[in-house]
Image: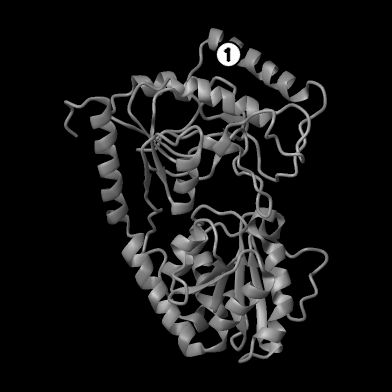
Amino acid sequence: MRVIRKYSECIDVIGGSPPVSVTKRIAAKAERLGRRFLVSQGDPFKSLNPSTLDLCINKSAFNFEINQASVDVLHLHWLGNYLGVDSLSIEEIGRLSKPVVWTLHDQWAFCGAEHYVTPPPAVDERFAEGYTAANRPSHESGPDLNRHTWERKRRSWQRPMHIVCPSTWLADCARRSALMRSWPITVIPYPIDLKVWAPCDQAQARRLLGLPLDRRLVLFGAIGGTGDPRKGADLLLKAHGHLKATATGIALEQLELVIFGQSRPAELPDLGFPVHYSGQLHDDISLRLLYAAADVFVIPSRQDNLPNTGIEAHACGTPVVAFRTGGLVDIVEDRITGALAEPFDPASLAAAIAWVLDDPQRRRKLGVAARQRAERLWEPARIAGLYAEVYRQAVAAASPASIF
């Protein structure tokens, strides 16, 4: 595994930037200057889309190292600018000489510079139509960085790559995209370590975390907590305003909300019941305890591929409530392992949460079914077998006489 930043001690993971000659350093500096000029010329780029942008315009020299490696197939994952380093430029991706399998973790590969299109209720179909001056959204201004980046991809990626999407939703988007609609696309979900993520005693988990033993706990969490509009925390807070009317079997004073990924803010939201903030969690054990402590885990996302939090919660035997959208429908089996609400209706979300919480026996059955679903769909050996078949197809397509 080749990465920019190495965090593990595994000897099979190689980190760091590749060695670059003086000539390549000068070329890279020139490209950085060109990138600054592109971004700064005229009015600055502005958009109501909260997604980050990655132009991937700087030469990294990773492609030289990778092309010289003694391997049969390259497996790409998330690409972009990480801590100031471009993993691969768009042009370098097009110059990879080995058969390529690329697992997409968001929409960047078939979009412009954005990692996600403008979230609902907006309708943003440039990725399917092709990026032109005529279909630029009205909420954007300044240089059309998305169109410029998409054009570079269209020119550079002439050889089809084997695309893997973790969710059916992302695969459908890729199949509709102007860039990848004729490429081979396979759905393979994320694997999960079923020993690390497993059910544990709820009461013990609450004691260890200092959470109340006699309350119904609703869990929400995301990187940045409530700060990312794509994750829909605002819709969850609105849903809690409906819970008093929809929750027939629970009194409002029995309900409490737990949020991870964010520290306690200076001004607390007034929901009529307590909110606990767990902050940023940096170990699997703490997060596993949180899943076990919760009665339900809510994912109110407007856009999501196949969030690991949903898979982890299911593996820990925790029912999940989410909107019927994106990759969330690949996680939650409605009324079997949790409940799906109508997008993006806070009242429907509240009703789904109440349905899970109203009946403790039903909640336990949902948790058992959630764990069984995790064992059936996301077991690592199963996922490895699916990838092995994609590798065989990629190598065979590049060299029909090859045997993998």
Task: Provide the secondary structure element on which disc 1 rests.
Answer: helix
x and y percentages locating residue 163 in the rendered image: 40, 39
Residue at the spot of label 1: 25
| Residue at the (66%, 40%) spot, across then down | 52
Q: Nearer the viewer, residue 5 or 148?
A: 148
Image quarter for residue 71? top left
User: What amino acid is found at the position of numbered circle 1 in the picture?
Assistant: Arg
* Above or below, comparing residue 192 to residue 373 in the picture: above
Residue furthest toward the front?
Answer: 134
Looking at the image, residue 282 sits to the left or right of residue 184; the answer is right
Residue for point 66% across, 46% down: 118
What is the quadrant of the N terminus in the image? top left
For image coordinates 74% across by 19% down, the residue present is 37
Quadrant location, the C terminus = top left
Q: How many marks?
A: 1
Question: Which color mode does the image show?
Answer: one colour
Q: Residue 299 location in percent, x, y?
A: 58, 65
Task: Decide: is 339 above or below 393.
Answer: below
Residue 122 in the image: x percent, y percent? 68, 50
Is 163 or 223 nearer to us in this picture?
A: 163
Q: Is residue 311 visible?
A: no
Where is 323 relative to 393, above or below?
Answer: below
Q: Residues within 10 Å of mark 1 (few under 14, many from 20)?
A: some
Estimate the x, y position of residue 312 in percent, counting from the top left. Answer: 46, 64
- Residue 5 shows up from this direction: yes
Q: Is residue 305 above or below residue 401?
A: below
